[in-house]
Amino acid sequence: MVAGYIAKGLVATGLNSGELGIVSADNALPYERPPLSKSFLAGKDDEQSVLINPAAFYREHGIGMHLNTRIERIDLQAKRLLTKAGEEFRFAKLVVATGARPRTLDVAGGNAESILYLRSLSDSAKLRDALKSAKKIAVIGGSFIAMEVASQSAQQGHDTTMVFPEDRIWKSFFTPEMSDFFQRYYQDRGVRFIPGAKVVARGERDVLLSTGTRVEADLVVAGVGVTPVTELAESAGLTIDNGIAVDEFLQAVVGDVFAAGDVANYRDVRFEKRRRVEHWDNAVSQAGYLAQRLSGQSEPFKHIPYFFSDVFDLSYEFWGDTTGAERTIYRGDVTSKSFSAWWLKGGKAIAAFAMNRPDTERESASQLSLAGL
């Protein structure tokens, strides 16, 4: 995603042919990730419709596309990238956007082909095909991706069970009232919840939980978080600290090297803290910023964290950072599918959540989350 949006941004600023090359281990052109757990997974979008730019875009603007190409080493001193096969790419400026990889289930039977993860376009295509024949689905995890996959599974008519170690859904983000609402909403649509449990083994047709319970499942989908892909950057000598450490300009200690997207741990000048964000909007915003930065912009990256989700017939958005919030207030009825939540600190809103609210309130939410920043 970062690569695709940097390309779009550089073209808008007057990119000359031959000035940009994209090297990717993926076999697809840069694509949007949100549809992978939503419309693409549901079969409503195809591979062409999720591309950030069509193939012709890269050809017309002289952008080198090198797919199925895995870089083995970054030589910072000589400014070159080396593949295992000995192919070499030279650069004047380098953006490392290696993203993140899914955490896997380290359990007995964890290598079973019936355990799937959702990260790439090919992952989503594989899961979409598997859902056509599966009947009982166990979704492991209780946050963002797990909730979206469980929603899609239930909407496709599957017997769906969510298993997670916390005592309520998405505890790290939702307030207790919000967790209660979403749990009821999912249960009313046939999703079964098993909180306070971990998977300890994958059987042929079930999963064994830490509670001793066995859950029937011919397909298991694990959404238990991701880990930034930093091995290449670390071996090159870049500073690693929960991702690639960069400054407020998304620049590494080594000159002419930048990082963006899920892998970048940057200095957030608005919140005065280091931050690594694993959401679509962050990748798009950092790519747009770097397109300007590589074209001569000198301002630091300033951005309010944002993400959105669609589950069943619900759509919600979130702005800000809840860290340090002293209390939460609501507008609307938190037991209904139309409410907003506001996290306050020192009497000012530092974060806001809005679901199925009027446009005027949504606009207020995006602005109030900026208060005092």
Image (cartoon, rainbow, N blue to C red):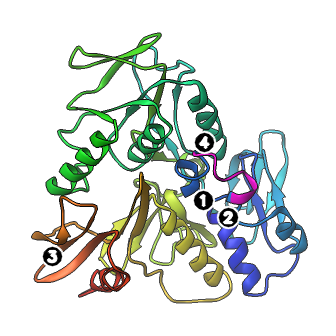
Q: Secondary structure at mark 3?
A: strand
- Of mark 4 and mark 2, the one earlier in the sequence is 2
Is any atom of residue 349 visible in this view?
yes
Q: Are marks 1 and 2 in contact (CB under 8 Å)?
A: yes
The amino acid marked with disc number 4 is Ser
- Above or below for 370 versus 331: below
Q: How many marks?
A: 4
Q: Secondary structure at mark 2?
A: helix
The amino acid marked with disc number 1 is Ala
- Of mark 1 and mark 3, the one earlier in the sequence is 1
| Residue 259 included in the magenta stretch of the image | no
- Residue 53 appears in which quarter of the rendering? bottom right
- Above or below for 353 versus 27: below
- Above or below for 295 versus 30: below
Mark 4 crowdedness (10 Å alpha carbons): few <14, some 14-19, many ≥20: many
Q: Position of residue 293 (x, y in %)?
A: 61, 82
Span of residues in magenta: 42-49
Q: Give the Cα separation between the discs numbered 1 and 4.
A: 21 Å
* Disc number for residue 124: 4
Is any atom of residue 30 visible in this view?
no
Q: Residue at x 63, y 46 (%)?
A: 43
* Disc number for residue 97: 1
Question: Which residue in the structure is indicated by mark 3?
Answer: 344
Q: Residue at x 51, y 89 (%)?
A: 299
- Above or below for 294 versus 32: below
Question: Which residue in the structure is indicated by mark 2?
Answer: 3
